[in-house]
Amino acid sequence: MAFHAIRFPLDIALGARGGPERATDIVTLASGREERNSRWAHARRRYNAGYGVKSRTDMQAVLAFFEERRGRFHAFLWRDGLDFSSNGTALPTPFDQAIGTGDGLTKTYYLTKRYGVVFDPYLRPITKPVAGSVRVAVAGSEVTGFSVDTLTGRVTLAVAAAVGQAVTAGFLFDVPVRFDTDRLDVELTSFDAAEAPAIPLIEVRE
């Protein structure tokens, strides 16, 4: 089992469907009131790439990708067409997301994306930033002295931020996923068309 740092064919991924999934236990009491418990700290995303297959060429690309990943065995990168950026656009800025506050000693921070503002914001760990897309600022000024681990989302500053200084970042990112099936069920609908009713993918936690 390994992680392959290769992205699923982008033109097919953009036609897919999917999104975040949560695991919530709900118990209804005799009074009619509910007790709810969230079992996962982080959402897990699911996708169906079958909706993105439009031609025989698309299906051949998926088939080759599936075989090289050995079905469910190896994980890979997936571009979520709706949620792939720190600010919702293809042009991140170094001020998009707060990732820490300086203490004069710490140089290492981890990329996160914040969802929501007032009630109970959710901080999503971003572990697969796109190489070359990460921008960082300290105390409101962009810096270039940093390195990024694109397999963990770890940012290391060359110089520690001073006490109280805000460390912010902007980035593009992918989702680590694997196939959620060991079988492809392909139908050739015409000479140059193919249909794959379901190609399920599921986010992997590391």
Image (tube, helix red, strand yellow):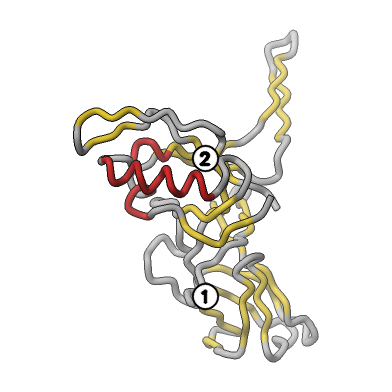
Looking at the rendering, which quadrant does residue 189 occupy?
A: top left
Circle nearer the N terminus (2, 1): 1
Q: Position of residue 159 (x, y in %)?
A: 70, 91
Q: Residue at x 50, y 60 (%)?
A: 6
Residue name at image x 74 percent, y 8 percent: 30
Q: Secondary structure at mark 1?
A: loop
- Tell me the residue at 63%/78% (across/down): 167
Residue displayed at 38% across by 64% down: 89
Residue 60, image quadrant: top left
**SS for callout 2:** strand
- Residue 154: quadrant of the picture: bottom right
Q: Is residue 11 left or right of residue 192?
A: right
Single out the residue that lies furthest toward the top: 30
Front one among 40 and 195: 195
Can you give x and y, in whole percent of width and height, for residue 75 in the image? 59, 50
Amino acid type of disc 2? Leu
Q: Which amino acid type is marked by label 1?
A: Val
Foreground tag (2 vs 1):
2
Of 125 and 27, which appears nearest the observer? 125
> Foreground residue, 176 or 183?
183
Q: Which residue is mark 2?
A: 201
Percent x, y of residue 171: 50, 69
Circle 1 Cα neighbour tier, 10 Å, few/some/many (<14 / 14–19 / ≥20): many
Graded by Cα atoms within 10 Å as few (under 14), some (14 to 19) or many (20 or more), the crowding at tag 2 reads many
Disc 2/disc 1 C-alpha distance (Å)? 26 Å
Looking at the image, is 55 positioned above or below residue 112? above
- Residue 100, image x, y percentages: 68, 72
Residue farthest to the left, as pictured: 191
Decide: is 106 above or below 32.
below
Q: Which residue carries the number 1 mark?
A: 134
Q: Would you place residue 62 above or below residue 26 in this image?
A: below
Name the outermost residue toward the right: 105
